[in-house]
Amino acid sequence: MRLWRGVRGFFAIALCAFVPLSVHGAALPDFTELVARQGAAVVNISTTQSAAARVPSFPGFDENDPMFEFFRRFIPRHPELPRTDPDNRSLGSGFVISADGYILTNAHVIDGAEEILVRLVDKRELRARVIGADARSDVALIKIEAAGLPRVVLGDPEKLKVGEWVVAIGSPFGFDHSVTAGIVSAKGRSLPDENFVPFIQTDVAINPGNSGGPLFNLNGEVVGMNSQIYSQTGGFMGLSFAIPIDVAMDVQQQLRTVGRVQRGRIGVAIQEVTRSLAESFGLPNPAGALVSAVEADGPAAQAGIAQGDVIVRFDGKAVDSSGDLPRIVSASRPGTRALTQVFRNGAPREFTITVGEWRDDEEAPRAQRRQRPQATPNKLGLVLVVPSPAQRRERNLEHGLIIERAQGAAARAELKAGDAVLAVVAGGRQTALKSVEEFNRWVGDVKEGQTVTLLVQRSETTSYVALRAGE
């Protein structure tokens, strides 16, 4: 078997010698000039952390959560070396954005660091100080005392095309200035708990130590900063994600001038518009962000935005999917007056929202669920009861019914006991629910196969759920 593999490898090598490096007659790109011209602006970053700071922190995930391993940050380590010293050394990458020593890297690279050491291409090692870091975007700005440094040229991620060649330079596993190449796989990706950054997805080989390194286009311009990988093993599996450079530069500018990142908020909960929901709300296409809840006295509520509105444009920018809205709103400065276009009752309307400021410490209270009395199922498989006065106060319900049991179509739509059904949407109009009998009579008139859309509250979250009667 060993001999066969060896022979097969020989013929593979021999064959490659006669195959030109081209695809459909076009020569593959040559990255040598790009690397020679821009590689000097890429730096290696090593940090020293105390023993207490060794455990990596994944925002939004508990260490025991399976998702903890799903989107692994590049927390570079040398697992083959035993840890006997009280300090922990980590490696990452960065790139010089100004000749006087300002460097961009990932926030998780320098998180908890007691000392940051930057190694330049000429082997000089300089201590760096942190100007600022933003965990939400995973962007950090550090500074070394130097002058006349080579710096990168910035590009425009908006002009980046899916399928375009891109190059990463960094220090995977501590191997300085390693170069890998691939293509752009997708743009505007939303990752779990990371809805403020429209990530660039690539298939460029990225490994621990590439964190914070630049992603170049073929013009030698930085279009992104490598930040995350999808991995079930901790190593590269063909899915890499980079922060668009315009997002990173906006964050660093705020860190440098304000000391923190100001993000906009409008006080709404949203969900994706499926084809079934679009049909229920009278929309021509399944696009936009469906408002499932509006914060009382929040910016959107003060402007007149209501539950059931579908936001299709915000401040002149199209909202094609629900994931677009958080990124557009968060990029707006607090105090901005943003013209917002919505669909309400099947017709377009416009509102002007004065954008508020996002606070990371804001958290809505969570309601506790209680046992519900028995009732009779209806055609949708729902067993509903009227909430008690105590339940209304607990859930802050002005109207609605409580699900005691869900089966059939309701169960397949993932409704369950304890959910509150607040309203039903039909013909593009939303009607609040107040009576079990009235709702069951309405359901009795629903034809088999007809789509029924319900507004459902679960804990502190409300969302629209489409289910098909008779399924």
Image: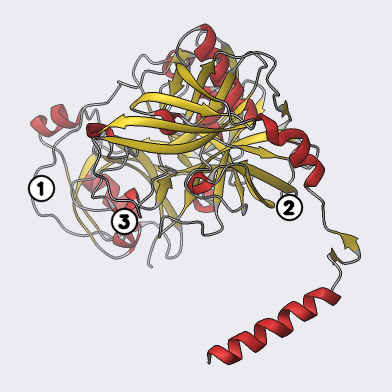
Q: In the rendered view, would you say 392 is above or below 419?
A: above
Q: CA distance from mark 2 to mark 3?
A: 37 Å
Is the Cβ of the residue at disc 2 closer than 8 Å to that at disc 3?
A: no
Q: How is the image coloured?
A: secondary structure
Q: CA distance from mark 2 to mark 1?
A: 54 Å
Return the mark for residue 414. 3
**Looking at the rendering, which quadrant does residue 146 occupy?**
top right
Please indicate whether residue 183 sits to the left or right of residue 381 in the image: right
Q: Which residue is mark 1?
A: 372
Q: CA distance from mark 1 to mark 3?
A: 18 Å
- Give whichever of discs 2 and 1 has the lower sequence position: 2
Please indicate whether residue 23 sits to the left or right of residue 216 in the image: right
Please indicate whether residue 37 sits to the left or right of residue 91 in the image: right
Across and down, in percent, residue 113 comes to 36, 27
| Residue at point 62%, 85% (across, down) | 6
Q: Which residue is mark 2?
A: 163
Across and down, in percent, residue 259 comes to 46, 10
Of 468 and 310, which appears nearest the observer? Answer: 310
Determine the secondary structure under disc 1. loop
